[in-house]
């Protein structure tokens, strides 16, 4: 399986890279970001050389041809680029919409158009958040969820999309933050759940924090 990880330098993406490198079902990883992806500390460098390609992109609204050629014929994509809630107050609204909504919708369209394989669907996961309402509302996350699900629905089976809505993601060993009403999930669990779903197929089109904990822990136990 050829997997694209969008936003490959981030907190979740770094754990995804580490687990994907160790997973034999994933044979090729395109780490797409505005900066070079750093190899996870525990990565076997020979496995990484064989499987991983870090692609730097300076335009997520219109990919340069050199980037497009690396995105050809992907089987799946896990999209993690967004203005995270902690940074919302520091980024202007227009910019937030562009980064959190338009980059994701451009990605799903572009990666779909760059596929030759008409037999199997492209699997696209969009990372959203527990509290994101599925409407335009005050943040673009909810609107993006609808656009990503609609794109798959209109693709006549060529694309399957899945929205994941985790609560707070806890790094191993780090102090737990608390936000009233927000559930928690451990970083290894969410990464395992995302990889399980792109490899085995989506259980449903929207996965809650509880779903992700259950799928991730089962996948890690296996
Ligand atoms: N962390 C949590 O507790 C949590 C909880 C619920 C949902 N989520 C969601 O999960 C997803 C991943 O979260 P995360 O914690 O891994 O986020 P993160 O560490 O902030 O990583 C975000 C990624 O997006 C990239 N990015 C941000 N702005 C960009 C821009 N203008 N152009 C290109 N790339 C840009 C970052 O690149 P740079 O490294 O270059 O900045 C990084 O690769 C997000 O959608 C987030 O909202 C996270």
Image: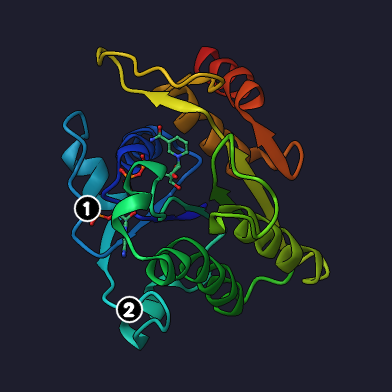
* Residue picked out by circle 1: 37
In the displayed structure, 177 sits above or below 17; it is above
In the displayed structure, 164 sits above or below 168; it is below
**Residue shown at the point (33%, 14%) measured from the top left:** 176
- Give percent across and percent down for residue 207: 67, 35
Picture quarter containing residue 141?
bottom right
Q: Nearer the viewer, residue 206 or 160?
A: 206
In the visual, does 35 lie left or right of 158? left
In the displayed structure, 113 sits above or below 32; it is below
- Give percent across and percent down for residue 185: 48, 21
In the visual, does 157 lie left or right of 147? right
- Give percent across and percent down for residue 179: 45, 22
In the picture, which quadrant includes the C terminus? top right
In the visual, does 215 lie left or right of 1? right
Q: Nearer the viewer, residue 23 or 30?
A: 30
Residue furthest bottom as drawn: 65
CA neighbours of label 1 inside 10 A, class few (<14), some (14 to 19), many (20+) = many
Judging from the image, what secondary structure is the residue with disc 1 in? loop
**Do the residues bearing badges 2 and 1 touch, measured as CB atoms within 8 Å?**
no
* Residue picked out by circle 2: 59
Q: Nearer the viewer, residue 113 or 134?
A: 134
**Residue shown at the point (53%, 23%) measured from the top left:** 182
Question: What label does residue 136 carry, if any?
Answer: none
**Residue shown at the point (53%, 54%) measured from the top left:** 139
Judging from the image, what secondary structure is the residue with disc 2 in? loop
* Eye-nearest disc, 2 or 1: 2
**Residue shown at the point (41%, 79%) measured from the top left:** 68
Q: Nearer the viewer, residue 121 or 15?
A: 15
In the displayed structure, 135 sits above or below 211; it is below
**Of callouts 2 and 1, which one flags the residue occurring earlier in the amino acid sequence?**
1
Tell me the distance, in whole angstroms, between the alpha carbons under discs 2 and 1: 17 Å
């Amino acid at each position: 399986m050829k997997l694209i990880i969008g936003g490959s330098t981030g907190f979740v993406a770094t754990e995804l890279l580490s687990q994907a490198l160790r997973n034999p079902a994933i044979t090729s990883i395109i780490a797409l970001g505005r900066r070079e992806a750093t190899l996870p500390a525990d990565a076997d460098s020979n496995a990484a050389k064989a499987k991983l390609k870090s692609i730097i992109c300076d335009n997520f609204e219109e990919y340069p041809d050199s980037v497009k050629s690396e995105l050809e014929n992907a089987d799946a994509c896990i999209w993690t680029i967004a203005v995270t809630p902690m940074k919302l107050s520091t980024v202007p609204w227009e910019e937030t919409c562009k980064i959190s909504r338009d980059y994701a919708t451009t990605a799903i369209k572009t990666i779909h158009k760059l596929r030759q394989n008409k037999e199997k669907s492209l699997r696209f996961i969009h990372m959203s958040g527990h509290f994101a309402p599925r409407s335009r509302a005050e943040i673009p996350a909810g609107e993006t969820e609808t656009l990503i699900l609609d794109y798959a629905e209109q693709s006549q089976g060529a694309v399957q999309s899945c929205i994941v809505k985790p609560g707070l993601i806890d790094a191993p060993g780090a102090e737990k933050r608390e936000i009233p009403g927000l559930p928690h999930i451990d970083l290894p669990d969410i990464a395992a759940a995302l990889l399980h779903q792109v490899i085995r197929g989506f259980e449903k089109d929207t996965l809650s924090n509880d779903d992700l904990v259950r799928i991730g822990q089962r996948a890690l136990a296996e």
